[in-house]
Amino acid sequence: MFAEKYSDEIQAILSKYPPEQRRAAVMPLIYLAQREQMYVTKQAMVEIAEILGISSTDVASIVGFYTLYYDKVGSTYRVQVCTDLPCALRGAEQFLEGLCNNLGIRVGETTPDGAVMVEAVMCLAACDKAPMFQVQSGDGLSYHENQTVESAASLVAELRRKAQSKRRDGHGR
Amino acid sequence: MKMVNLTIDGKTVTVPEGTLIVNAAKKVGIDIPVFCYHPKMEPVGMCRMCLVEIGRPVIDRTTGQVVREDDGSPKMQFGPKLETACTTPVSEGMVVLGTSEKAKAGRQDIIEFLLTSHPLDCPICDKGGECPLQNLTMEFGPGESRYLYDEKMHLAKHVPLGELIYLDRERCIQCGRCVRFQDQVVDDPVIGFFQRGRSLEIVTYSEPGFDSVFSGNTTDICPVGALTTTDFRFKARPWELRSAASICTQCPVGCNIAFNTRREAVSGGKWVIKRVMPRQNEWVNEIWMCDKGRFGYHYSKSAERLTQPLVRRQGELAPATWEEALSFVAERFQQAGDGLFSIAGGRLSNEDLYNQGKLTDSLGGKKVLYGTMGGGDLTAQSGLVPGSNFSDMGKETAILVVASDLHEEAPIWWLRVKQAAERGAQLIVANPRPTRLDAYATHLVRYPYGSEAGALLAMVNTLSAKRPDLPEAVANLVRSPELKAAAKAFAEAENAVILYGSEGTGLETSTALAQSCQNLLLATGHIGRINNGLVAVWQRVNDQGAWELGWRPVANLPEAMQAARALYVAAADPAGDDPAYLAEGRLGSQEQAFLVVQDLFLTATARLADVVLPVQAWTEREGSYTSGERRVQRFYPVVPELADSYADFSVAGQIGKRLGLDMEIRLAGRTFARLASETPAFTGLSYARLAEVVEQWPIVGRGDLYYGGTTYENSQGIGVQLPLTSAGGLSWPKLVEVGMPKIGLLAVPITRLYDHGSTLLPSSMLHQRIPEPYVVLNDQDAERLKISEGAAIQLIPAEGGSWLGVRAIARLRSDVPERIVLVPRSFGLPVAGPTVVSVRLAERVLA
Amino acid sequence: MDADTGLPSQSQNGQYLLLRHRDTPSIGELEVYRRLGGFEAWQKVITSMQPGQVTDVVKTSGLRGRGGAGFPTGMKWAFIDNKNWPHYVVANADESEPGTFKDREIMEGNPFQFLEGVAICAYAIQANAAYVYLRGEFWQLAAWLDRKIAEMEAAGLLGEKLFGTDYSLHIYTHLGAGAYICGEETAMLESIEGKLGQPRLRPPFPPSYGLFGKPTVVNNVETLTNVPLIIEHGAEWYRSLGTEKSAGVKIFSLSGCVERPGNYELPLGTTFRELIFTHGGGITGDRQVKAIMAAGASSALIVANEEALDTPMDYESVPRVGAQLGSASVIVIDDSVSIPWLINKTMHFFKHESCGKCTPCREGTFWMMHLTERIVEGSATLEDVELLQDVANQVKGKCLCALGDFSTEAVLTGIERFRPDFELAVAGSAVAN
Ligand SMILES: Cc1cc2nc3c(=O)[nH]c(=O)nc-3n(C[C@H](O)[C@H](O)[C@H](O)COP(=O)(O)O)c2cc1C
Ligand code: SF4
Ligand code: FES
């Protein structure tokens, strides 16, 4: 059970908001629920709804609105390459294509081991350091700037190794 | 109220300050088109359909005066952008242009945008013919679309949001009306938007899907065919439908409804009911209704209906002619004389009750209202004063809801009380366990089951210490600060209303409760003025009408029946509700009494009868009901009657005629006229009076369905609230002590919306929402008794008597008081009032 | 954090005011910041100034919002409704406009100056709680700020009864989760409240009805980072920087086809030419500058002629070349870029980010994206270009919030100012990028 397992974190999150505005904690709680499997289970939505006194549909609605939340099983890591205008002017699209070629997948696809998905995203506020991408996992997000296909590919290789050991330890998906 | 003058499309309008432009326009007959705006909800300005040009007079900053043109007219300044009429309040001197070229172009733009995503499948759409999008497109839309069809999004068209409501994603225009209705109006936020932008879709994550007893209303206010009911989907086209005004029979609110019918080949050319819609009555149900009313009407067309009289011959019920049956009954009633015992259910209309009463009275027999609630005489004395309206209640009003799970007992009243609380009314909720109304309460009072009357007397006592001899269970309550605060708030409010229900009560306790309620009203002077008074949350649609016409329940029906020589049971099924009647041979044994049952179905009681008389459903006839607010309302024939069938009042009348009585047997209206001439409260009433209408706000149905949804306009009567009879005096009730038993548990009856009532079960629509027979236990008790969630159990009454064989599922909750078992009414467990029981596991399945 | 580029840009007096980590890389450490005078302004306002005085100083300084709209900051603070309590401060760190990356650098490099600004704003409106709303992607940055906030609490700079007075303040971070619209202030408030990030109807504006329905000031990160300096050095000093109507310094996020993209802290009124050629090192390769977007993807397309290049970048001058300064996110476009392609890019963005609440934006961005797609693919006709223009005009001025209008800027100015590109594209030979 999510609520029991993370009761301390949940309390810490709730303490940031006025007690009569518990609902405000929904976004951090969803991140917390996403920590282990990189998606929010229905059960977790129900539990979050209970903690906050809202409906599970309300929680689902939030999950649906924001792009960094997922309601379905996906890859352990998501490599999100910015190909928005400023980055595109600096070769981000070619970079993405190169990376995908290197990995033998298409944009939006996941490596065969289910570890890493590569996708194009909107501006990440790092336009001067293109090509760049972020890596999202249940543990959070990290930026990787001024990348080359080679540097990115070796990072992906590392992520795949990590995903494998995560899975061995019973984490991941 | 400060009034504001402005002009809209050249028309001068004077409206109260704060009025929105759309509403001001509507009042002078100008329909500004809207999609997202709904007069019953907060404006959001999302759809942008209502864009208008707005000019405001230029004010000189230094003088604060309006700047004038050379010709003396005020100098106007128009904003650079179109503005939304649905979110902008009027202001003095404002000029609104809804039909300027710019405004017209704006509307056309919005319509064109909406159509880019719309499938334009009007020919097969259930909304076709009553669709705001269709109507507005005709009126304001561009002639053709410049959008490439193959770029349209193709989305799922049959998405069930639960088993009652379907979503067509392609048709949805994201106006959010449904989501906002569920959230703001009925506080069941069980549907929501998912994704964003053009991908927005309506979803539900509740179990069961779209878990709200108000869900059907979303299909009315959806301005396109995106939300439809399973009941009506693909069943007919709106323009082939005829409509007939009626009243919902499922609870004492008396929601005004409209039935839609059409002739169907599959039914052999017969008229059939296709759907039920709310009909506007701002004093009763506004423009809403609950799902029980909307989907539960199917019983009226059940194949199980009785179609001809039955008479017992050689021990078997066999078909007979009306002549045979009625003459036989008349003869036996004559013989019974003052031994005639009439039992009537509150489902009967005023006319039915009047005629059956007349018949019974003239023989000197006894009239018994089937039920376990008291106080209908008191609501006639201290009830709501004509002119009262929950919609008008706010800050100056206190509303006390006692012994009622109002959301289950009368959903529309729950909604209206909730809204009054949101407008600032002091809401006092007094109940032994938490209910859904608690969330809006300003004061919560908890009392033990059985002490409801005591709790109210305790409130009176804290105000004026009139009654010192309160039982012990109540004495503590007097000291409770919550109760004191509640009593104070109640006493200090300018107006006050009490609704009492039947949570945990039987006839005795209910009668005492009603008397205590009246005492509180009298003691605080909340009587005889508009928006003050007592309302009973009855268990049937016309219980109040029955009381008005002299019908009364009795404390111990089986015992009272003992003396009967003939029993005349209409619209009631005692044997079905309590197997004891069967087991102990109290009914249907020839030596005891001649039994006549008048009903729609061959009920358990009917099976025991000597004569069974079939009757028309309320959809096949005329009549009137008196609601819990004492509003007398007419219902009209919806479908033709079955061949050779009669309404209840006619059946009773025909028996009476055979006894030489002067009774009306043909026309409900004439029966009503007789009733009115003999019953003081009804003096001056007639069918014509009941059919009168007045203009209501919001204006619905005036060609622009987009304002109120597909709610029907009320053109056939808003009904009349009965005047109060003599104001009652303070008279103290006999308090029944319902203490906790030394051993065992206390079983108490509660009311559930989706129950096993004979007018609900035949509707297949709601079956998934109707649970198996169950009882609710406190979880600690259950642990002690080793009963787990879902276990099959039996209740054994301490006083003996056999309910063996009546099994129920145990549900465990922490918010039920300890040593209490909640027993929903109508599920076959005959708990008529607080009853001491023991609980045991049903070890094996009984055949 | 990255002052390692050795960029030639610098502020007026040779010292950074906002990007101070470029002068002092360790300024993100509390002792270092304090040693350089940090939190003196904070102590000063609490111990020796009335809240109203603080607002007055900011008002006279001429500081205007750096989040895009350029609204006078002191005036906004003065609008706060003092009849309704409590009050809140929300720092807008959503930074999602394509081409904008200045707030991130401030928070990473010079976090305390920003937090001090948040704190002073809170004191000025007597708020006891402030939220920093960061876009979800700033996950690590949020953790970093949380540490900095904790350090401040430990040092008695935040928390209860500050500096021996009765005033208390807590600052919290709140992470978004991927939605540009949450940068719009009312959508941001909804988002913090745990609702869909969709804009509210305005009025009422946040200073009267803001977070949790309470009076709230929403300010951009950069705006707030100016505040400690204004308190420290005075309003007059601040006014002396920049131009008459656009006081102070500004961080210009320079991106696109330039040699040295990055953040440049310069006085308002610096010309495009100076930014792009002197500081940014000019256009990459042997290309010519063709167009400039001054306010990220929401920007009108400025034809980069000599006059435009010589236009000072301040709130009043940029409109003269048919654009707005906005958040000063300068995207430089060279002559190899096809404008239809560029507009298709922006339309993808706006279509993806439209919250869906209002019809014209929801449907219009979707339609415009399809049209630009067709044009870029070479399967369109000139009629489609006209239609695109029509649709943009149909959206413009009818939306609930500014995003809808933003989405039309590049479209309308692109078609108007770079028509040959469209003619070329529909002729089936669009310049490939
Ligand atoms: C669609 C949209 C996106 C916005 N994004 C941001 C943003 O990322 N950061 C920001 O500071 N302001 C953004 N704004 C502006 C804010 O609404 C608001 O004006 C600003 O935070 C006020 O702060 P300021 O007065 O300090 O500039 C955005 C506005 C709109 C309409
Ligand atoms: S313009 Fe409308 S749809 Fe677009 S982001 Fe604003 S409110 Fe949402
Ligand atoms: S915006 Fe006014 S009706 Fe929708």
Image (cartoon, grey):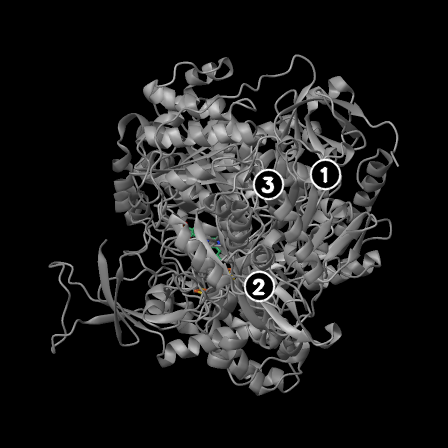
Relative image position of residue C183 (x, y in whole percent): 49, 52
What is the C-alpha distance between the residues marked 3 and 1?
15 Å
Q: Are marks 3 and 2 on the same chain?
A: yes
Q: Is mark 1 within 8 Å of ligand 3?
A: no
Choose the circle earlier in sequence order: 1 or 2. Answer: 1
Residue A21 image label: none
Give residue B621's mark.
Answer: 2
Q: CA distance from mark 1 to mark 2?
A: 30 Å
Amino acid type, label 2? Arg
Mark with earlier residue (3, 2)? 3
Q: Image quadrant of residue B241?
A: bottom right
- Residue B750 percent location from the top left of the image: 61, 34
Q: Confirm or deny contact between disc 3 and disc 1 (CB under 8 A).
A: no
- Residue C336 visible (yes or no): no
For the C terminus of chain C, give its image quadrant.
bottom right
- Residue lying at 52% horizontally and 39% vertically, measured from the top left: B552
Nearer the observer, B557 or B657: B657
In this rendering, would B591 be left or right of B459?
right
Foreground label between 1 and 2: 1
- Ligand 3 resides in the quarter of the picture at bottom left
> Which chain's residue wears label 3?
B
Tag shown at residue B587: 1
Q: Quadrant of residue B580?
A: top right
Q: Earlier in the sequence, mark 3 or mark 1?
A: 3
Which element carries disc 3, helix, strand or loop? loop
**Is residue B101 rendered to the left or right of residue C331?**
left
Pointer 3 residue: B370
Q: Amino acid at mark 3?
A: Tyr
Closer mark to the observer between disc 3 and disc 1: 1
Q: Quadrant of the N terminus of chain C?
A: top right
